[in-house]
Amino acid sequence: MQDTKVDPRITRTRRLLMDAFLKLTIKKDFKDITIKDITDEATVNRATFYSHFQDKYDLMDAAITEDILENIVDNLSHYNQLNEESIVKIFVTLTQFHTNLTTQLNTQCRRSYASFSSIIEPKVKKELEKVFYSLLLKQQSKLDSEALKIGAAVLSWGIYGASVDWKHNSSLSVEQYIKIALPFIVTEINHFKG
């Protein structure tokens, strides 16, 4: 099977459009960003925009997936076992994600963080769920697949929720927070192991 190479100009233009979009999210609320705003910022025409993306929602999805989620997934995908160490590292990765996203989006427009985080949250939870499912499957291969999926969903929502709680409601350091939360998480994981 022959690999098809993507023309570097296509990759550059796509990246230019995503960067322009991300810059605009700092200045404007998502609902107020127009295709014209994006093409002006990227210095391309509308036809070029539409040759890469269907609409601004498609662009936003690509920007989130390619920029934000890939970074998170890269940091999460190398764990071999679900234990205290991996839970702490996953939690730290999520808190870094929240801090970086806040820094990027909150610099000029607080509303951008709120709109982006509500779009990103389900995607991050879904990726976490995949990570937890694969870890649980390695450790608990004898358990029913449905039980493992439920366990992965509970863990992903719980860890993500704890990272959001840390970001918005806690004055503790990341390390202090996870140290307090860890016994609750580990108890559930140990209970799950039977």
Image: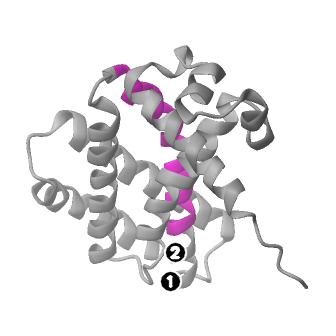
What residue sits 57% from the left and 21% below the top? 37
**Residue reaching furthest to the right:** 1
Look at the image and say whether residue 143 sits in the magenta stretch: no
What number of labels is visible? 2
The amino acid marked with disc number 2 is Leu
**Quadrant in the picture for residue 180:** bottom left
| Left or right, residue 182 beside residue 60 | left
| Left or right, residue 144 beside residue 15 | right
What residue sits 40% from the left and 76% below the top? 82
The amino acid marked with disc number 1 is Gln
Q: Which residue is mark 1?
A: 139
What residue sits 30% from the left and 47% below the top? 100
The answer to whether any part of residue 179 appears in the image is yes
Q: Are marks 1 and 2 in contact (CB under 8 Å)?
A: yes
Q: Which residue is mark 2?
A: 136
What residue sits 61% from the left and 54% below the top? 12
| x then y, percent, for residue 171 | 8, 40
| x then y, percent, for residue 176 | 10, 57
Most common SS among magenta residues:
helix
Q: State the separation of the CA atoms marked 1 and 2.
A: 5 Å
